[in-house]
Amino acid sequence: MFDMSVALFDLNPTLDVASLSSKFANHGRVQVRDILTRQTAQTVRHILQRETNWGLACQVGTEAPLMLRRHEVAAIDPAKRQALGQSLHRAAAAGDYAVQFHQYPILTAYLEQWAPNSPHDFLLEYINAEPFVNLVRAITGMADLIKADAQATLFGPGDFLSIHNDSHREERWRVAYVLNFSDPGWKPDWGGYLNFLNDDGDIIEGWLPRFNSLNLLRVPQSHQVSYVPPFAPVGRFAITGWFRD
């Protein structure tokens, strides 16, 4: 169980904010390595790995996204689960939007009080607290950011996220973020990269899901999470969401 006496979200005090801000200004994205102190990063990884009731997120083409809780996933008929997988693969093969990964909707769980005072609740509060929000404001140069949502994500073998650009302006999304807590020994062959693409479909930059790193990207811009192959021995754990004005 999570030890409530452990600091859950201590930021690394040695970050070079000026350099990070310059990179974001030039490219509209930056990966911040060692975002948290090592101990607290390991604590968050433990929460995701051992204390999270993973559900399922998937979407086929323009159909409505499917967000299932853990007990709902367990209740799916095996034949229906297989058919869903086949439809996802057909959509991806045709170049249509398709996505499949495991998820725990931290914000929804917080608002609906699925598990009051859980470590996930505290994580959401820390992400929205002044120290972290101010850091994101400083790096992005967006002083009007006021809040962020959050979901825990797990990309295991067979999971992927097709090319998209997060252009949901009605949601007032300004900056997407990914807090990575994958295995510190994550190998490039295991996939799960956050890739950025140009208009010709070339990957112009790709980031390993590096343990204890924060990815920030201005929206909209085209990106994807690359396929995690069946031989990947561990999952790509992260907390993801968007900062809004």
Image (cartoon, helix red, strand yellow):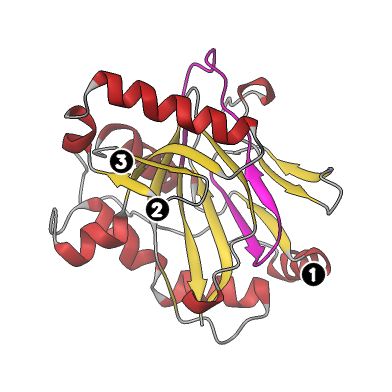
**Which of the two discs, 1 and 3, labels the residue nearer the N terminus?**
1
Residue drawn at (52%, 46%) of the image: 61
Q: Residues within 10 Å of mark 2 (few under 14, many from 20)?
A: few
**What is the x, y in percent for residue 156?**
46, 27
Side of 158 relative to 51 (left or right): right
The residue where tag 2 is placed is: 64
Between 63 and 6, the one lying in front of the other is 63
- Nearer mark to the viewer, of 2 and 1: 2
- CA distance separating discs 3 and 2: 29 Å
Q: Which residue is mark 3?
A: 47
Residue at position x 26%, y 39% in the image: 52
Residue found at x 59% / y 26%: 186
In the depicted view, which residue is nearer to us: 187 or 76? 76
Span of residues in magenta = 212-237
Which quadrant, please, contains the N terminus? top left
For label 1, the SS is: helix
Sequence-wise first label, 2 or 1: 1
Q: Is residue 120 left or right of residue 102?
A: left
Three-letter amino acid code of the residue under disc 3: Ile
Q: Which residue is the site of mark 1?
A: 22
Report how far apart the C-alphas of labels 2 and 1 lie in the structure: 38 Å
Q: Is residue 31 left or right of residue 237?
A: right
Looking at the image, the residue that sits furthest to the bottom is 144
**Mark number, residue 142:** none
Q: Label 1 is placed on what type of residue? A: Ser
